[in-house]
Image (cartoon, grey):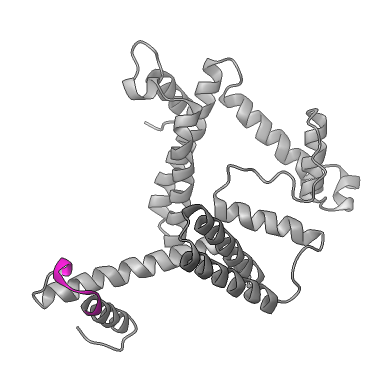
Amino acid sequence: MQYTVNDLLDIMQRLRDPHTGCSWDQVQTFQTIVPYTIEEAYEVADAISRGDMPDLCDELGDLLLQVVYHARMAEEQNSFEFNDVVEAICRKMLRRHPHVFGNDKQIKRGKQDWESFKMQERAARGLQEDSSAIANVASGLPPVLRARKLQKKAAKVGFDWSEISAVMEKLIEELHELEAEILKSNNKHSIEDEIGDLLFSVVNVCRHASVDADVALQKANNKFEQRFRLMEDIIKRQGQNLQSLNEQQLDEFWNQAKQHLTGEYSV
C-alpha cells in the first residue's frame, strides 16, 4: 500500500482526537511542539551533511510531520488547515518568480529582488512596514543564524568592515574584554554580555571569510567527539581508567589521539 499526504493528515487527526487519540499528542500546543520542529530541521541538515540519503528521506518525513502537526492544531481552532498552507506557499512561489511563471514581459524583466517581494506581501497584508535596515530578522531564529542575518542586512547599507583584518582586530578586542571581566569581577551577567559580544564577532569573522559558522562549529563538534572517543579507547587499551587520571595525563592522552588521527602516532 502506498500512503499519501492525506493518510498522514488522517493519522494526525486521529492522534489529536480528544476522546480516542494519544494522550501525549492530545495535550500538545504550538509552543510545546516548536522545539521538536527546530530539532527536526537540524536533523535534516545533519543527514544532508553526512550524505545519507535513506536517513534524509526519513528525516524529511519527520519534518513534514511537524508541518502537519501545526496545521492540525490551527485547524482545531479554525485558523487555517493544511491545504491553506499548501495554497499559500504555491501562490508565494508563483508570485516571487515572475521570471519563471509570468508572462513574456515579466520574464524579460528578469529576477526581482527577493526582499522587495517580501515588502509588497507585507503591505498587501496590511502589516506596518519596519523602516530599519535590519528589519524582519525573526527573533526565533537560532542565535548564530540570526547574528549572520543581522550582519548581512547591516552590511547592505555600508555598516561593515571592508577588510577581514579589522574584523579580526575586533575579535581580539572582544576576547581581551572578556578576559578582563572574568579577572576583574567574575560577575555572571557581565561575563555573559562579553561572551555574547565575542560570539557575535566570531560569526562576523566567519561571514567575512565566507564560512558558515554553523557548519564550522558542527565540524568542530564532530572532531571533538572523534578525538574524545579515540582517547577513551587508548586509555582503555592501556588498562587505565579515565576518571582516575589527572589533568596532565588526560592532556597527554588527548594529544596521542590527536596525533593518531593525523597519522603521526600509532596506537
Q: Position of residue 59 (x, y in %)?
A: 42, 45
Residue 266 visible at all: yes
Classified by dominant secondary structure, the portion drawn in magenta counts as helix
Q: Point out the residue furthest to the left here.
A: 239
Residue furthest top as drawn: 19
Left or right of 160? Residue 72 is left
Q: Position of residue 233 (x, y in %)?
A: 18, 72
Q: Nearer the viewer, residue 170 or 98?
A: 170
Residue under the image location 45 percent in, 60 percent down: 186
Query: Which residue range is magenta in the image?
Result: 242-248
Q: Is residue 22 left or right of 39 when viewed as pictured?
A: left
Q: Residue at x 78, y 62 (%)?
A: 159
Residue depicted at 12% across the width and 69% down the height: 241
Q: Is residue 246 above or below residue 119?
A: below
Q: Residue furthest right?
A: 105
Q: Number of marks in the image?
A: 0
Q: Examine the structure image and report whether residue 116 is included in the region drawn in magenta.
A: no
Of the pair 256 and 15, the residue shown nearer to us: 256
Which residue occupies the extreme bottom position in the image?
A: 264
Check the image and report above or below for 141 versus 1: below
Q: Position of residue 104 (x, y in %)?
A: 88, 46
* Residue 192 image point, x, y percent: 51, 56
Q: Is residue 148 above or below residue 98?
A: below
Res. 267 image quadrant: bottom left
Q: Residue at x 11, y 78 (%)?
A: 238
> Does residue 4 appear in this view?
no
Name the foreground residue: 76 vs 255.
Answer: 255
Q: Is residue 212 above or below residue 62?
A: below
